[in-house]
Each structure stands twice: as structure tokens, then as C-alpha cells.
Amino acid sequence: MQGHTSNLQLLKKQLDRTFKKEKDRQKAHATSSKILEDLSTNNTLLGEILRSNLNKRNFFSQEHYPVLAFPICASEHYELIANVWIPLASKSTEYSTKSIHHHGPMLLTTVTAFGPGYFHYLFDRPVRDESESNVFSMKVLAANQHERSTSLFVDQYLPHCPMYPEKLSITYALWSNSIQKQLLSRVKRLPFLRQHSTLLRQIGKKIGLTKALDLKLETYLDYYPANDHFCGVKEREEVEFKKGPIPDRASSIINLLQETKNEDLLSLCEKDLLANQSLGEQIKERCLNLVSKAKAGTEIESRISDGVHFGFEKANFTHDQIKASL
Ligand SMILES: [Fe+2]
């Protein structure tokens, strides 16, 4: 229809306006959380988000991380992504989906738009035990179910941890940097600062400017429970998941389309598979078979890839382990 504005376009317009008008990023997030809460039950918007991504070449047939990411929209100030949280085959809600982690200076607002959502722990900044290098203590700021249509704000440098949901859940995650990059790059361009970055780091450390100047210092992004304390993980590689196999992603996306009643988009999955030249014949056949079954009305299960996306002691621990470490 000519002149028709989609829900997706309207959402982008609203967020663009908010971030342009409100220079205080925390306030921009507060305003945006209301926008996202209002749209969290809009099934047409969800359908548009799924369609726009499934229309992208090879979006369907690729390897993936345990949480499926469907980008929604972005500007120089923010990025909005629909995250699809796949339940464990056992439907257990006992385990964490990843390590306890923070996102440095990034701000995150998330709103559950489908399903029961996940149980979420938010912690205060970790306090390091001076005597042992990777030993930290943390206090819980909030521990609750991230229910549908509710928003959650994760402030800069605050560790958090989503647990596995009971059923497929979708969150709209809004990201922005607490530090305005334009200002940063201007400061960093100053010749004196460029030539004296070591000195600046030392000064910055003393007067607490390192975060404001976004200087790269050794920092722990990930943590896991270890009885009466938490351990910091120095190398992110230790807890970062590898990408899982294409048929698992295919199963999970098909299941997502079935659960959200967007089966009309199955034809886009089929189109993508048929057009993909680099896909091995066997994998292509397996995925096409899944699409055919779904088209015939068979329910397809979502798939967490065991040994790739689950089963790691530093990333998949229980509520009890977290409680015992507080
Ligand atoms: Fe996170």
C-alpha cells in the first residue's frame, strides 16, 4: 500500500526522536522503555521484525549463538535488537544462560515482548578481594522474573545474569553507550592526549576519569559463583559460546515462527535455503525437510546445542550456586 508507514518505521522514528532530543542517555532510556512497553504486545510489529530479517540473504541459514538475534533498528545513538531466548529441552529454569557479566559503559533497556520471560539477577558493582586476584564479592540489587511488557534497565558496569526461561521468550533490547562517542573522539583527537596516553591513563585512574574517557584498562567482564565468593574471568574466550550448527538454528527459527503464529514466513526460510550456494547438500536437505514438515503442520522443537551452548560450569550455573556465593 502506497504511503503506508509500518510499525517498524514508526518505532524507529520514535526512538530517533527520543535520542536526538534527550542528550542525557539515562533519560533517553527511560523514555524509550515506555515506548517499548507500549509496543510489547503488538504482534504486527513482531511479524515485521521477523519478516525484515528473514528477507536478508543467509539470515536463516547460518551458524548462531544460543540467543537468536533479530536486529530491529539502529542510529548513531542506539541499537535495538529482538533477542529470542530458547528454553532448554528439559524446560528447566534452574540454569543461567551465560556468565554473570557486565557491558562496560553500555546502557541496556530490555522489554519482554513474548513468552514468560526469564528470571534475572542484577548485581551491584563487584568488590575485589585485594588478597586474591580474581576473587570478588557482589550484592544482589534485584532478582525477579522479567515478565511480559515490563522493562528492565541495566546500568553501565553493573553485572547481570538471565536464567533459562520456561518457554520461548522474546525481549527487545535497546543498547546505547553512556559516553557520547562524538565527545570522546574529540577528546581523544587532542594531540597532547594522543602522545601521552600512558600518562593520561595514570592520571585517569587516579581521578576516576578512565571510564569517562573510555580508556582500555584491564577489566573483568565475566564472573561465576564459587561457593562463598565470585570468580572473575580474565579472558572472555573462556566463557564465550561458539556458534552452533545451522540445523539447530533452523529448528529454533521454525519453532519461533510457529509459536508466534508467523507460519506465513516459512516460505522465506525455504527461499533462503534454496538460494544459498555455500550450504552443504546434506545440511540444506535437513533444513528444507524441517521447513516442509512445518508447512505440513508438524510442530518443530527449538534446539539448544548441547556441548556448544550449554553445559559449561562458568556459564551455566544454578540459582543455588548464585545464592551460596553471595
Ligand atoms: Fe547482558
Image: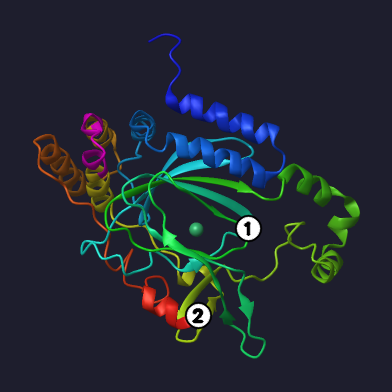
User: On the image, numbered disc 2 is attached to which residue?
Assistant: 326
The mark found on residue 156 in the picture is 1
Q: Residue at x 10, y 37 (%)?
A: 297
As helix, strand or loop, the secondary structure at mark 2 comes to loop
Q: Which residues are magenta?
A: 256-265
Of 119 and 263, the residue lying toward us: 119
Residue 176 is situated, as x and y percent measured from the top left of the image, at 61, 46
Q: Amino acid at mark 1?
A: Gln
Label 2: how many Cα within 10 Å (few below 14, some 14–19, many 20+): some
Q: In screen coordinates, is 231 left or right of 114? A: right
Q: Is residue 101 magenta?
A: no
Q: Residue at x 46, y 43 (%)?
A: 81
* Residue lying at the far top of the rendered structure: 2
The mark found on residue 36 in the picture is none
* Residue lying at the far bottom of the rendered structure: 131
Residue 36 is situated, as x and y percent measured from the top left of the image, at 48, 38
In this orientation, does residue 121 appear?
no
Q: Amino acid at mark 2?
A: Leu
Q: Main secondary structure of the magenta part?
A: helix
